[in-house]
Image (tube, grey):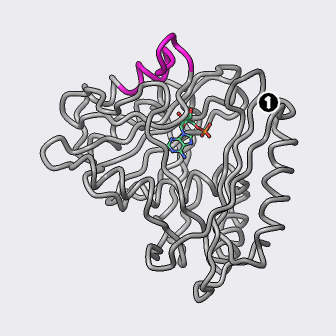
Amino acid sequence: MLAFDPMDAHLYSVRMHASLDNRHLSGAERLVGGEGVEEAAASLVRRALNHAQGRAESIRLSVDLVDPDQVHFGCLPDVHTFDAPDVEAGREKALQLLLLAEVSEDAVRSAMEHFVAGAAPGGGNMRGAMLIGHRSGKRYEPDHAKGIRARHMDYSLTARAELDAALSEWGIGGDRLRDALILAAKVMAAPGVLAELCWSDDPDYTTGYVAAPQLGYNRIAPLKARGDARGGRAFFIDEDRWQPEVLLNHLRDEVFVADGIGRIFPPERFEQ
Ligand code: AMP
């Protein structure tokens, strides 16, 4: 278990980025007190070396001291899980949820089409997220290959333990869910973001999610077919009130620590 004491004067961000064949393979971050840096670094390296899509060829680690005044605490969203009969029904469920979050159908279809085609120029996967206008479906991120990466978020020691215990009651959990949930928690608190849609580019991971402040974190399985190596992430922004600098500062520079968990609902199976 990684150490994080909210009162620790020295909080470090430990980040890992691994690549294979010059492509992004894995990336993750931990926020830990000084005494937790070594263990965090070792666990991130272990993760890069044991990636399901192959052993990393190059692993970069960075360790940076974080300004304690920049740290914001918050709670995790509620977690819902929907099991759909097929991909089409899963995507329809995602659309319905996003409509409830005030995102237009055009904007949702635009995001999904980019995921399916490969949202980076040339049809590859992006490193970060698209910023999609909630009404027009237009893309606003300046670099279509890099996208916008959210960083500097982690769980407090207690929140991590509580989350793992609560998720395991329903037989769910793992690094992927933990990473996506903390990212979504930070993104949902971002000024100007209405909702988020994600499905992984890992061909073996078909569960995706929709997150929005009033809807919580909604896991939907499947959102893509097994074997499909395309995926992506879209942050839907309110075109009437978002402010690029404020949003990017929140996503990239503010430090978010979840110190409480939300409710975890039992998986729900539905037919179309
Ligand atoms: P993953 O769920 O890790 O397979 O990532 C799915 C997609 O989400 C990737 O292809 C990226 O486009 C995007 N993504 C991954 N990590 C981040 C991040 N920290 N911030 C924003 N977007 C990300």
Q: Could you tell me which residue is drawn at 33 percent across and 24 percent down? A: 109
Asked if the beta carbon under badge 1 is closer than 8 A to the nearest atom of ligand 1, the reply is no
Depicted 163 relative to depicted 104: above or below:
below
Image quadrant in which the C terminus is located? top left
Disc 1 designates what residue?
53
Q: Position of residue 70 (x, y in %)?
A: 44, 73
Q: Amino acid at mark 1?
A: Gln
Q: Is residue 114 magenta?
A: yes
Q: Could you tell me which residue is drawn at 72 percent across and 23 percent down? A: 22
Q: Nearer the viewer, residue 75 or 28?
A: 28
Image quadrant in which the N terminus is located? bottom right
Q: Nearer the viewer, residue 159 or 100?
A: 159
Q: Could you tell me which residue is drawn at 86 percent across and 50 percent down? A: 46
Q: Label 1 neighbourhood size at 10 Å, few (<14), some (14-19), many (20+)?
A: few
Depicted 34 relative to depicted 172: above or below:
below
- Residue stretch rendered in magenta on the structure: 111-124
Q: Position of residue 163 (x, y in %)?
A: 64, 70
Depicted 154 relative to depicted 62: above or below:
below
Residue farthest toward the bottom in the current orientation of the protein? 7
